Amino acid sequence: RTLLPRPGRFWAMENGQCQDLDAKSSELLLIIMPGRSGREAVLSRIIHEVGPVAMLVPERFLEASAWAKHLVTAWIDFKGPGLEDAWRAVSQWMASSGRSISGCTTWDEWGIEMCAYLCAPERLHLPYTPLSTVCQVRNKFHFREACRQAALPSCRCANVHRK
């Protein structure tokens, strides 16, 4: 077991997994979907510099995300594609573990809306871009319309529907 100093506490590396020696009182960073194994170095550095991480993974991404399971302090997976399904899984995990989430992020395109939804004041109450804004900027037409309405430079565009 290797002890790793952290400000105010110590962590232990056991069997390749970062273990918080004061696990019940610590908060975790929630990362939504780790993506492919090429991101292992990034995740390892986050754990080393930030501290313990909980990983939230929708069922459809479990196989591609399995590489990260041994690195994180908590693994939360859930069935269903919906944002409410993700919130239910996170809130049940927090209630059963007694742990809390101090931050939420993603580096995957599929996790941006979920991150915004979870961070809302009525859920985790964490700083993040509001879900409505995230949805607006992820849609090219809506983003360009918002820029035009705000008198910002933008390309002319049209929304074309095909049957």
Image (cartoon, grey):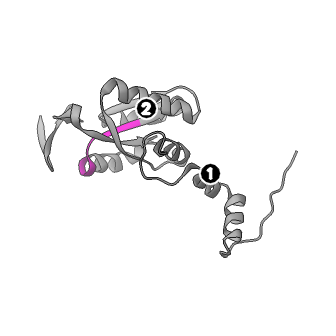
Q: Kindly indicate the quadrant of the structure image that contains residue 156.
A: bottom right
Instruction: Work out which residue is located at the far front of the displayed protein and give it.
Output: 122
Magenta residue span? 48-55
Counting from the top left corner in percent of width and height, residue 112 is at 52, 48
Which residue is at the front of the view, 113 or 48? Answer: 113
Q: Residue at x 53, y 25 (%)?
A: 79
On-image quarter of the C terminus: top right
Magenta includes 60?
no
Q: Left or right? Give the position of 35 relative to 74.
A: right
Q: Secondary structure at mark 1?
A: helix
For the residue marked with disc 2, what is the amino acid?
Answer: Val
Counting from the top left corner in percent of width and height, residue 24 is at 22, 31
Counting from the top left corner in percent of width and height, residue 88 is at 49, 28
Q: Earlier in the sequence, mark 1 or mark 2?
A: 2
- How many neighbours does mark 1 have within 10 angstroms: few (below 14), some (14-19), or many (20 or more)? some
Q: Secondary structure at mark 2?
A: helix
